[in-house]
Amino acid sequence: MSEKIQRVRGTRDLLPEDSNVFRFVEESAYQKAKLYGFGEIETPIFEFSEVFHRTLGETSDVVSKETYDFTDRGGESLTLRPEGTAGVARAFISEGMSQNLPLKFYYSGPMFRYERPQKGRYRQFFQLGAECLGYDTPHADVECIAMAWDLLQQIGISADCTLEINTLGDAESRAAYRDALVAYFKSNESQLSTDSKNRLEKNPLRILDSKDEGDKKLNADAPKLEQYLNESSRSFFKKVLAGIEKLGIPFKVNNHLVRGLDYYCHTVFEFTTSKLGAQGTVLAGGRYDGLIEMMGGPKTPGVGWAAGIDRLADLTPKELAIAKEVLVAVIGADDAGEDESVKLAHEIRSRGIKVENFLSGKMGKKMQKANNKGAHYALILGGNEVSSGTVTVKNFVTGEQQTISRSDIATFDFKI
């Protein structure tokens, strides 16, 4: 096969068996979002590059190595969205929503990052997320985490996931910690990787996320954030932990969990698993009170999370995604039956019942295909049935067969 008609590296075809699980995950998340009062928002797949470059930071790996940037015919620099939060924040500002606070948004859709493809990581991947704007109380953090936990339970993977949580403190605590980190890393600057040397001035917290082995050794002895938390930050975090505990959500505090971006503060959390190899994070989030202000909007507190649908689907038990619905096969036994079968299938579908109409082939082959498809019933139409106004009904589960009036099909109980 020509290389030009292969899939692009890092992408995937979602075939029906995969799409069923994806749909189940998305529908489960959508229903949970509605229960928690989140309204659905859809932002464009591409934005002006500044939306992501400014929020994620020019020195971040996402921007420096992973974003799909291009110049359109009008000379504008655009970027395919690598994540969802920045687009929601941009919409909040550009649509003038600040008068309607508080607001809660849910989103779902494709994202794009130029990463090294591996299990659970794609260059076009799918993500869903929730953003809660206008609440500066720790109760909002608790509710966001609870919604995430409910989703993981709904799709049957909570037992395989661990909630890890930490605090970054408020702006004052974070500034004090930043100063301590800069002093420490400057005294060891010769041992830092090139990327971390670039991060040192602009955002030293990103060094703590470094995958470089030399950086990891330095990070082991770096100052710890908890040493620089002021009393209000400690109090905020205690309330979050108490709220999670009250809801019975298991968790562990991970003091090494950070978010390197300047707008993050207070709560950060991840749901992790050991079931997906190196790609252990399935859902992550935190509080980002400085994001909208940094983008030029009014000071607006926010907290939210995002999850990779690809990874959630990989973990979801496939049997949960199989809809328990009846399948009816319509089979024309001869030319007269096939002519009438389209109308009969249409009538049954109008009742909201799934129908597979087998339109070609011999009678025996059609019956075999219907059985292989998992049909619960076969409705058989031949010339005799058409002329007598009847339908032969075969129950594949019990093996029983009966002939009924065509008019009775409108009320026939197709039960599993």
Image (cartoon, rainbow, N blue to C red):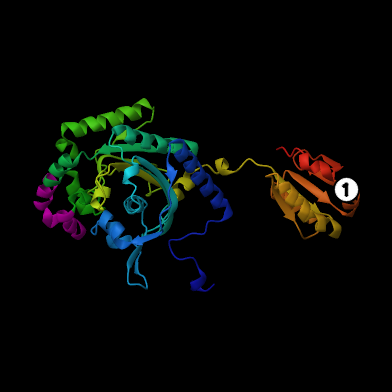
Residue lying at 26% horizontally and 46% vertically, measured from the top left = 259
Residue position marked by numbered label 1 in the rendering? 389
In depth, the one of 374 and 203 nearer the eye is: 203
Which span of residues is magenta-colored? 180-202
Quadrant holding the N terminus: bottom right
Q: Is residue 248 magenta?
A: no
Q: Position of residue 312 (x, y in %)?
A: 45, 45
In depth, the one of 138 and 275 nearer the eye is: 138
Q: Position of residue 339 (x, y in %)?
A: 81, 58
User: Quick one: SS at disc 1?
Assistant: loop
Residue lying furthest top in this view? Answer: 246
Q: Is residue 218 left or right of residue 129?
A: left
Can I make out residue 223 in this image?
Answer: no
Look at label 1 and name its amino acid: Gly
Main SS, magenta residues: helix
Against 198, residue 4 (above or below) is below
Q: Position of residue 230 (x, y in %)?
A: 15, 34
Q: Position of residue 298 (x, y in %)?
A: 25, 47
Against 334, residue 218 (above or below) is above
Quadrant holding the C terminus: top right
Numbered circles on residues, count: 1
Please tell me how crowded label 1 is: few (under 14), some (14-19), or many (20+) other residues with Cα within 10 Å: few
In depth, the one of 33 and 284 nearer the eye is: 33
Q: Is residue 197 magenta?
A: yes
